[in-house]
Amino acid sequence: MPRQQQPSAARPARRRSYDQFCATARALDSVGDRWTLLIVRELLGGPRRYTDLHADLPGVSTDVLASRLKDMEQTGLALRRKLPPPSGASVYELTARGHALRPVLAALAEWGAPALAERRPTDAVRAHWFALPLLRALEGVGHAGVLEVRLAEGVFHLHVGGGAGAVLPGAETYGPVYGYGPADRPDARIVLDAEVCLELARGGATFAETVKDGRVEVAGEGPLAAGLRGS
């Protein structure tokens, strides 16, 4: 008679908690895994398909990305939904709790900016990775609107406005603070290079100074463009 197979031992569940009654530890229970905060960074720009996320997270394996997205759904940071016809594709997007991590990402970007003194040969780059540092540099802009940003690495757009501490358009409903590609109807456009973005992120110059010395070109005729020019 064939020998009966012994049931395989159940695999132990992966440890998911530091088991510490501490707000920082609880936060890291949710976002402390490798890649999770970078997925949040990508989803701050709006809903994205799995394939788009994988393309803009060079170095992540498909298994790890799928696992992190599942974890984010379970912890209430993100959700998956199906787009209506004719697309029918599934996209991932942040929940309100996920969007609330934007100040955390902005603070990390500010803290890490000095480490970007030199781009290593193995470093990937995407234009929209400069979105959060640019938003901080533009906090003093006195007019709200959509700003299209053009770099050699690509194009993205920002929702800016209102001055320091202002509520960004869409923030009331936790909408995206930046978007991928050109804007449909931008209120202004700027052209600059990655080095200027890095200088702004490190605090080496103000946005007004880079406009004045010609390293940032501003296009547009409305109030936002005028504010960016300092007029």
Image (tube, helix red, strand yellow):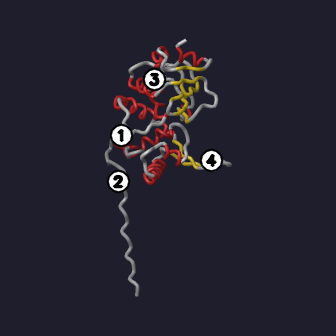
Q: Residues within 10 Å of mark 1 (few under 14, many from 20)?
A: few
Q: Under tag 3, what secondary structure?
A: helix
Of labels 1 and 4, the one closer to you: 4
Question: Badge 3 is on which residue?
Answer: 137
C-beta proximity under 8 Å, tags 3 and 2: no
Instruction: Give the residue type at disc 3.
Output: Ala
Q: Which badge, 1 or 4, comes first in the chain's sequence?
A: 1
Marker disc for residue 150 = none
Is label 4 in a helix, a strand or a loop?
Answer: loop
Distance between mark 3 and mark 2 Cα atoms: 39 Å
Identify the residue at horizontal 52%, vertical 13% (top origin).
230
Q: Pointer 2: what residue?
A: 15
- Mark on residue 23? 1
Give the distance between the C-alpha atoms of the residues marked 3 and 1, in whole angstroms: 30 Å
> Disc 3 vs disc 2: which is toward the camera?
3
Q: Position of residue 208 (x, y in %)?
A: 47, 16
Q: Earlier in the sequence, mark 2 or mark 4?
A: 2
Q: Is residue 170 left or right of residue 9?
A: right
Residue 157 appears at what percent x and percent y? 55, 30
Mark 2 vs mark 1, CA separation in Å: 18 Å
> Which quadrant would residue 198 be assigned to in this image?
top left
Q: Is residue 220 left or right of residue 10?
A: right
Other residues around mark 3 within 10 Å, as few (<14) / some (14–19) / many (≥20):
many
Disc 2 residue type? Answer: Arg
Assess disc 2: are there few (<14), some (14-19) or many (≥20) residues with their C-alpha within 10 Å of its C-alpha: few
Kindly indicate whether the residue at mark 4 contacts the one at mark 3 (C-beta within 8 angstroms): no
Q: Which quadrant of the figure contains the C terminus?
A: top right
First of labels 2, 1 by sequence position = 2
The image quadrant of residue 30 is top left
Residue at which label 4 appears: 83
Q: Secondary structure at mark 2?
A: loop
